[in-house]
Amino acid sequence: MQLDSRPRRPNRLARREAITFYLCISPWILGFLIFTLGPVAASFGLSFTRWDLLSPPVFTGLRNYTHMRDDKLFWQSLSVTVRYTLMYVPTELVGGLLLALLMNQAGVRGIRAVRTIYYLPTVISGVAFVVVWMWIFNPQAGLINATLARVGIEGPRWLADPNTALTALWMMSLWGLGRTAIIYLAGLKAIPPELYEAAEMDGAGSWPSFVYVTLPMLTPTIFFNLVLSIIATFQTFTSAFVATNGGPLDSTLFFVLYLYRKAFQEFQMGYAAALAWVLFLVILVLTLLVVRSGQWWVYYEGEKR
Amino acid sequence: MARPTLRRRVPLRRWLLTGLVWGVAILFLIPFLWMISSSLKPNYQIFAVPPQWIPNPPRWENYGEALTTLPFGRYMINTAVIAIVTIIGHLLSCTIIAYAFARLRAPGRDFLFLVVLATMMLPYPVTMVPLYVLFKQLGWINTILPLTAPAYVGSAFYIFLLRQFFLTIPRDFEDAAVIDGANIVQILWLVILPLALPALATVAIFTFQASWNDFLAPLIYLQKPDMYTVTLGLQFFRSTFTTNWAYLMAASLVTALPVIVVFFVAQRFFIEGITLSGVKG
């Protein structure tokens, strides 16, 4: 009897633990089914229909997807989003790292205040953030052009000019680099000081120890930021909606802005769902490529043998 | 001061570094200063070239006038209610879920955690249309429920953040509690929560910031002007009064103020919480 019950007790405990686990996460499972899996499946189904929310959806097969081929605004919004991502993601990775390196200079006077200042703009990201920059970019009296005028240069019309509007949005988003920097800062602080001491003993100066210690140890953080940055940049919405509403001449018509218009202004829910799936696939493919590439350049301390 | 020899050796370098660090800080501050300065200018100064940094005379009335043109007090209360209800939801649900993922063993746990992480990658627009339809059928349009109810079933990012934090807490504390006969609710409440305060504060602040600045979701779900949040109010204000920049700057500053204040008050927890959240999977 005793021999019997002994192995059974841990089993029963394990079972109990498993039941407790599933009880604890049951809200998440419920939420996942209702707010994620269900809507994902529904949006996939809807993407094969024509639906204006009023009359029942009509099945149209692949019509929504084939229609995109001739939809100039679809291509325009895709091109704007891809160009912007190509501009912004590298600057976010490099700029965020540079900012984090500055934040990490513990010897500088008032470094705590500096960290707060760098991070502050991300606290107000949203409409207020965009409105400030609309004023800074104002072609006549905005800070940039008024300053340029002082030295006799006539500045571009920034958000009002199709050739510069996207660049202006890019400049504006640099003000929010603190968010990326703070994640880098966490990564920098996690690098064991012994590594720097060892590098110093080998006679390495600050540049070699940055290249051979800091960068390799930071690759998991860079990787994390790269993935998040791609996903977030492809979904840019607020800045374009508030600052330019996609204009001038659709030069800032971001993909999600176009999707929002189709869904909530033109009530083409089926087409909007199809657009969302295209966006999803693009992001998915890019993310998988990045994750795949990770094995070549991301260095995990725990895995070394 | 601790290492005088080193200081004497590299004073120039240190000065350059300090200059660089503060120079960039000033660049980051300029938009704020410009915003404050513009908000206090009388109309004839606002388009002055070259730009004037010190408003002369400062026009404090801009604030009162901007804020009474639209009921910004109302918008702030609306947004605060949404933020608080969402924070409570996240703290209740994510804590329990994250604790289960961090500590309890069960078949399928690691797979489910991967699913949690995967949902973070899912673009919002994919679920946007069906969710709108769902909430419309539930009669939730023009209520705060579409913005708050999902918080009560957990949110992937905060589950991830808290799980990472819980993993850094030594198991010994809980083991002692188990020996004393504590159940999981008691362990969470008496042992884990007091230790996890910085992480919980981080979740609360992040949630507050996200709710306060959220734009797309309120834009979709709140169509009645008396339900507007601050971002919707500001956007409405912007599209109506584009010419009056002084009012716009004043309104922007006032609506940004609560997040700035919350950030300053809770800053210590915040940085600590993020640092500990780490990026390791």
Image (cartoon, helix red, strand yellow):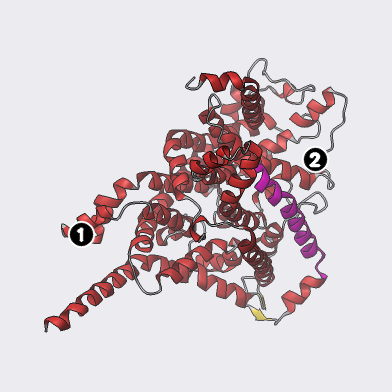
Chain where mark 2 sits: A
Above or below: residue A283 compared with residue B3: below
Query: Is B39 left, or right, of B191 in this rendering?
Result: right
For the residues beneath circles 1 and 2, the answer to whether they share a chain is: no
A29 in relation to A94, above or below: below
Residue occupied by mark 1: B178
Q: Examine the residues drawn in magenta and state their main secondary structure.
A: helix
Seen in the picture, residue A256 relative to B9 is either above or below; the reply is: below
SS assignment at label 1: helix
- Residue A231 in view, yes or no: yes
Question: In the image, which disc is placed on residue A62?
Answer: none
Q: Quadrant of residue B35?
A: top right
Q: Residues within 10 Å of mark 2 (few under 14, many from 20)?
A: many
Q: Residue A215, position in %: x, y?
A: 61, 47
For the residue marked with disc 2, what is the amino acid?
Answer: Trp
Are the residues tagged 1 and 2 within 8 Å (C-beta)? no
Tell whether A102 sits left or right of B94.
Answer: right
Q: Point out which mark residue A158 bears.
A: 2
Host chain of mark 1: B
Question: Which is more toward the observer, A120 or B208?
Answer: A120
Select label 1 or label 2 by which is in front: 1
Instruction: Answer yes or no: is residue B239 visible.
Output: no
Q: A235 or A219: nearer the eye?
A: A219
Q: Residues within 10 Å of mark 1 (few under 14, many from 20)?
A: some
